[in-house]
């Protein structure tokens, strides 16, 4: 688990930093991450996928 306070008004581009924090706390890579649609930044999702982490999150359209 990882939490952080940021000055952005949304969660875009926050998934990768949260996973890096979780890796530090857990001492290993996460295998699966669940996130709400606010984290669904394409850039972040590409980075997460490149690390072999499975992502469960709704599409932005579906969440509305």
Image (cartoon, rainbow, N blue to C red):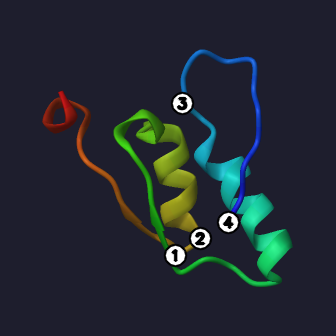
At label 2, counting other C-alpha atoms closer than 10 Å, the crowd grade (few under 14, some 14-19, many 20 or more) is few
Precedes in sequence: disc 1 or disc 3: 3
Q: Which residue is mark 3?
A: 12
Disc 4 or 2, which lies upstream in sequence? 4
Task: State the image coordinates of residue 62 (x, y, percent, origin top left).
Answer: 14, 37
The residue wearing badge 1 is 52
Front position in the image: 10 or 29: 10
The first of marks 4 and 1 along the sequence is 4
Gap in angstroms between the C-alphas marked 4 and 2 = 18 Å
Q: Residue at x 43, y 52 (%)?
A: 35
* Cα–Cα gap, marks 1 and 3: 20 Å
Give the left or right position of residue 54, taking residue 44 as reference: left
User: To which residue does mark 2 refer?
Assistant: 51
Q: Quadrant of the C terminus?
A: top left
Q: Do the numbered discs 1 and 2 sit on residues whose CB atoms are within 8 Å?
A: yes
In space, the residues marked 4 and 1 are separated at their CA atoms by 18 Å
Could you classify mark 1 by the number of other residues whose Cα lies within 10 Å: few (under 14), some (14-19), or many (20 or more)?
few
- Residues at discs 2 and 3 in contact (Cβ within 8 Å): no
Q: Secondary structure at mark 2?
A: loop
At numbered mark 4, what does the secondary structure look like: helix, strand or loop? loop
x, y (%) of residue 24?
85, 70
Callout in the foreground (1, 3): 3
Query: The N terminus lies in which quarter of the figure?
Result: bottom right
Q: Which residue is mark 4?
A: 1
């Amino acid at each position: 688990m990882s939490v952080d306070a940021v000055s952005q008004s949304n969660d875009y581009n926050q998934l990768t930093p949260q996973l890096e924090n979780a890796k530090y706390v857990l001492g290993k890579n996460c295998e699966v991450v669940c996130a709400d649609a606010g984290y669904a930044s394409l850039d972040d999702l590409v980075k997460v996928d490149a690390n072999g982490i499975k992502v469960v999150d709704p599409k932005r359209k579906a969440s509305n």
